[in-house]
Image (cartoon, rainbow, N blue to C red):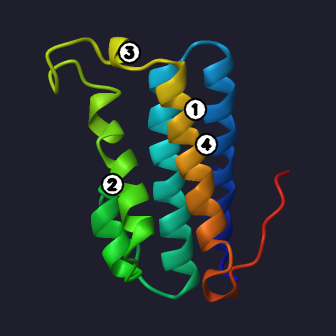
Amino acid sequence: MKAAAVKWLKQAKHDLDMADKNIDIGGYDVASFLSHQAVEKLLKAIIIYEGKKSPKSHYLDQIAKTLMLSGDIMDDLNELSADYMISRYPDVMDSVPFEEYDRDIALEKVAIARKIFEQLQDRSSFPEVDDE
């Protein structure tokens, strides 16, 4: 397994763990953003592991095209895609980003990210990497 893919996967898992922790402290917008980031990094880890060049994009649907993903997983990816912008930038919507998120939304985003991790864990015999 390529060292770069391992680094991406470790960071993806860390981001997902941090998403969970932010829920506990009321950082619902941060948890949602980190859910997106975790999935983005997971997808890039798989791309690198499969010997392809990682796309320079934050759009999950574009990254997923590199992996030829489709179906339900694309629906899940789309559920997280908007959070890359909405959770951080006050000029994307008519409100302050953190005011758009609550505990239920953050829990849903983290659950979607965890589901995507589970769905892709066997992709190309991608080995499980323990958190250190």
Q: Which residue lies at the image location 67% right of the left edge and 72% below the top edge?
A: 121
**Mark 1: which amino acid?**
Leu
Q: Which residue lies at the image location 62% right of the left edge and 23% below the top edge?
A: 22
The answer to whether mark 2 and mark 1 are in CB contact below 8 A is no
Residue 70 can be seen in this image: yes
Q: Which residue is mark 1?
A: 107
Quarter of the view holding residue 3:
bottom right
Q: Which residue is mark 4?
A: 15
Mark-to-mark CA distance, 3 and 1: 15 Å
Q: Earlier in the sequence, mark 2 or mark 3?
A: 2
Residue nearer the viewer, 122 or 72:
72
Q: Is residue 4 left or right of residue 70?
A: right
Residue 4 can be seen in this image: no
Q: Which residue is mark 2?
A: 78
Image location of residue 80, percent across then percent down: 39, 46
The answer to whether mark 3 and mark 1 are in CB contact below 8 A is no
Which callout, 4 or 1, points to the residue nearer the camera? 1
Quarter of the view holding residue 56:
bottom left
Dot 1 alpha-carbon crowd within 10 angstroms: few under 14, some 14 to 19, many 20 or more: some
Q: Which residue lies at the image location 62% right of the left edge and 88% below the top edge?
A: 124
Q: Quick one: SS at disc 2?
A: helix
Which callout, 3 or 1, points to the residue nearer the camera? 1
Mark-to-mark CA distance, 4 and 1: 14 Å
Mark-to-mark CA distance, 2 and 3: 20 Å
Q: Earlier in the sequence, mark 2 or mark 1?
A: 2
Q: Which residue is mark 3?
A: 98
Q: Earlier in the sequence, mark 3 or mark 1?
A: 3
Q: Is residue 43 left or right of residue 93?
A: right
**Mark 2: which amino acid?**
Asn
Mark-to-mark CA distance, 2 and 1: 16 Å
Say if 3 sits above or below 88 in the image: below
